[in-house]
Image: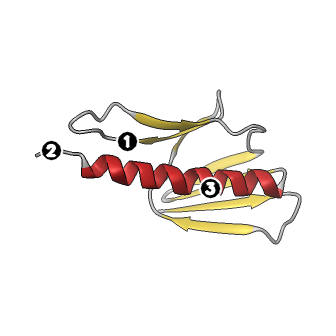
Amino acid sequence: MTVLIACLEDPSVSIRMDGRLPDYVPATHEFRLNRPIGDDWGQYIRHVPNPPPVIVRTEESTSFVVFERRDDANRFERWLIDAREEQDRGFRTMRG
């Protein structure tokens, strides 16, 4: 699974991140990853970028996320790195 992050401001920016894909809610521009805590799978790490991405598209195991500005693309990359680390900590709390 891969997330490709780009921006219109600088077409040379192409951030490729392998790993879990976040869910995306187009109506609210919310990205989220599940974060299990113990046996509770109902917890989520949520993020609504401001400004929102210009394009979000998922095809099979790849998500494309395009922002207007480079700084916004970099902030989204940082959120996804941090969210995946938090998700990994949650997986370590699972029982069973």
Q: In the rendered image, which residue does mark 2 sit on? A: 95
Instruction: Give SS at disc 1.
Output: loop
**Viewer can see residue 64:** no
Question: Against 77, is 42 above or below?
Answer: above
**Viewer can see residue 70:** yes
Instruction: Give SS at disc 2.
Output: loop
Residue 6 placement, left or right of 35:
right
Of pointers 1 and 3, the one earlier in the residue sequence: 1
Question: Against 45, is 27 above or below?
Answer: above
Q: Residue at x 46, y 54 (%)?
A: 84
Quadrant in the rendering for residue 43? top left
The single residue placed furthest to the top in the displayed view is 27
Q: Residue at x 36, y 54 (%)?
A: 88
Label 2 – label 3 distance at C-alpha: 29 Å
Residue 65 placement, left or right of 33:
right
Q: In the rendered image, which residue does mark 1 sit on? A: 35
Instruction: Give SS at disc 3.
Output: helix
Q: What's the residue type where badge 1 is placed? A: Arg
Camera-side residue: 59 or 31?
31
Label 2 – label 1 distance at C-alpha: 14 Å
Quadrant in the rendering for residue 27? top right
Q: Residue at x 79, y 55 (%)?
A: 71
